Image (spheres, grey):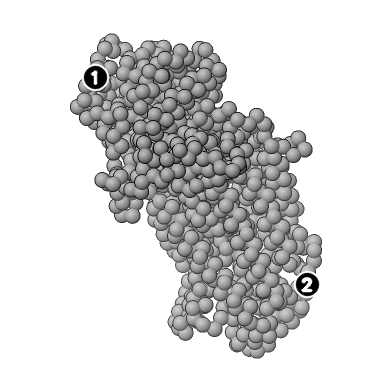
Amino acid sequence: MASMPISAKPPAGQGLFTRQSSGLVRELGIPAATAISLASVAVVNTFINFNAGLTAFNMADMTLPLLLGAGIWLVAMFAYKYLLEAIPRAGGEYVYVSRIISPALGAVFGIGICIAFTYILAANANFTAQYFPFLLTALGAAFGSSSISDAASQVTSQRAIAIISVVMLLVVGAASWVSLRRLAQVILALVIVQLIAFLVLGWLLITHSHSDFVTAFGQFSGHPNAYNDILVAAKKDSIPLGVSLTASLIAVPFMVLNYNGVLYSYYVGGELKRPGRTYIYASVISIVLLIVVWVGVWLLMLNTVGLDFMQSQAKLGANDATAYGAITSLQSSAGGLGYGLVLSGDPISKILIGIAVPSAELAVDLAFVAVITRVLFALAFDRLLPIGLAKVSERGAVPTNAIIVAVAGGIVFALLAAFLNLANIVANLALFVALIILAGGVAATALPFRRPDLILKPGAKDLPRIGGIPVPALWGAATSVLALTVVILIIAHPEVFGAFTVSSVVTLVLVLGAGPVIYLIARQLRLQQSSIDLRLAMRELPPE
Amino acid sequence: MFGSRAKKRALRIFFATDVHGSDRCFRKFIAAAETYDADALILGGDIAGKGLVPIRSHNGTLSAEVRGQVVTVPRAEEGDLRAEINRLGFYSLMASSEDLARMDSDPKFVDTAFRNAIADQIRAWCRLTEERLAPKIRCLITPGNDDPLAIDPVLKSEPRIECPEGELCELGPVLVASCGDVTPTPWNTEREFTEEELGKRLAAILDPAPAGSHVVVNFHCPPYGSSLDFAAELDDTLRPVIRGGRPSIIPVGSKAVREAIKKYEPEVGLHGHIHESRGAQKIGRTMCLNPGSDYSADLLRGAIVDFAADGSYIDFLLTSG
């Protein structure tokens, strides 16, 4: 369309003379992309996940896994940077793998991501519902209201969990109707709430000594020796305490998965302004921020709460709930948030601690709906799914039909998860998530060999190389090796990362196999009616 | 379910539009012939860049205003700087202090330099087309409203490309009718006409088409209210009108184009002009397409359109490459 300066400001002396365009749909800058990345991780969840890690791994210290996990994502970040610069689109691994390696293989991850991430959407909603008692406990403590605290016991039924989950997903769906730029502002606000909660907890941990915590925990639990009682009960149950390097190394995949989402702004690559630059800034900011707050708070917890106590509490709460419940009413799975609640004296801190998790899960689900709908959009755009899913609203410039499908799928999964035990069926979800990273690494490795034209700078005849190997391939190979290591560790430790049962393996095979089947059907149907092969939609044009 | 194909294609067109001076998109456009196995390429207007960005040399560095900010780079990075400027749809121009002062005070000087830059680029693109495009592939490039009228003689003089602007052009089994004119825009470009005038111009192109011929219209302006023409509403100061916190989106296509499509019933309508309104819409029996444009992200949005030996339309596929 025609173009001239929209702004009333006249062009400056060395500025852009004559005309400027009114801009397209690429409207996400660094803050919006950072919000999506941080929300996808759920910053505050680590307080809880520390506890999950200590439950899963005997004698683990989270410092090393936190640092190594971040390192792996830093390597992957560079691999994805090349992919996004080569193919600045929505759709993530689906578009990368389908364009660089094979459309059918791309469909494996495209459909798989939609199914798996929709389940995660539902799982987050369920998690929020299960966390409602803690929220009510915290709010009851903040307002000194026993009726609020008592209400905590009223929202633990399957029905209550199902209702809360569905309501949350409907809210997420409605909120996703606005433009992604506006939604990212909401997400950023939710992330800021989490960060404030982190700061509050950090401040509480800094300003209280170990003995303060011991005393406060005793007061919270209703008897002064509660802290030592936890340690004694753990010893009685032969819970191993202390630090083992091996255990810490095995915990690395756990922490890698904990950071999962930190690069997810590439899924909305079609809406990023200057995609490569925006993505890399957003990812670096997110990773550095997470390292600082997570490692910082972990070290503070080691100092104020004590590793032996955290290990004892986590294991006891998970394995001997009766013994644990006899000592304290503090929800063991609350982890760091629980410690914060114990130490907090003012109602503001209690409220912040209480709403931190729901705000985190809301942010995660908003970000995941954005991610899922962009993958659905990409699949529909390529005609693997009905073209209606690629329909974008005129007002918000969001794929509305895809939002409906994602939320509807999430509600189905949420209801199933509320009333049935899906643990066995989705046991290999961690493996699938690791396989996604591996796919990205392999695509980045192949990129300079299969499509060098997509990353060659104008006028350049060759890519930068180290030791004769193109630099993008080196980042891709490093990512692949690290992701493969994570995959192997996950497979080697089914007791922690998910057992391989008939139902879980069949589910994994179905999720992985659905994509190629849909691709082949869609392609054959099109060939039957048309002269244009579906594969043409997945070809990238060589610019040089 | 897995039966044989319904129709065999005799002609495949790859259509793209609104590349706005992007070298990278034009290179992709040329590469599209081989990638998509196309028999003909059509670039449907707004091929010229949007303006000039002066680059100033000072003490071994180069500085220019890019995206509203002054960027300074070492002289060795001149190529990167020029590429970034080009990606935004602008031409770069090495300018002395005197040139800069003149650009501020002499609009004619800017205009001449701008038109020269456009012509130079079109000639360079034609050389590239000669080098890279297989001889059997036809390449049609027609102007749009953002292209100065002065580029028409340049396009028409190039032997490797065809510029059938305002004409009917035979292309295998179909006739292509091309028109880069549009209805009035806020920017007062050189190819703007009232609906009535535009209707007459379109009729003048289409009336000579023999009865029963299969026509493809390559009209830069999309038909009004076709969903291929949604753009942000602008106020008198050219600022987007905000309603409910979002830019108001309205149809800005041409009613004359819509009427012409309904009257002449071409097989396919190829349109552009509105970058953000990518899509496909049937008007009567005509499949109208706007592949949109995302040139500033180095993406070439396009459409593959297949025709049978009798000139009838078979199918289309929107592409991003």
- Label 1: which residue? B203
Residue A367 visible in rendering: no
Residue B4 as seen in the image, left or right of residue A480: left
Which quadrant would residue A389 be assigned to in this image?
top left
Depth check: give the residue in front, A13 or A400. A13
Residue B279 rendering spot, x and y as whole percentages = 38, 34
Residue visible at 61% across and 47% down in the picture: A507
- Label 2: which residue? A242
Mark seen at residue A432? none
Furthest-left residue in view?
B196
Residue B185 rendering spot, x and y as whole percentages = 28, 36
What amino acid does circle 2 point to?
Answer: Gly
Depth check: give the residue in front, A486 or B198. B198
Q: Answer yes or no: are tags 1 and 2 on the same subunit.
A: no
Query: From what the image shows, is residue A394 above or below residue A342?
Result: above
Element at label 1: helix
Query: Which mark is in front, 1 or 2?
Result: 1
Depth check: give the residue in front, B236 or A472. B236
Residue visible at 29% across and 49% down in the picture: B241
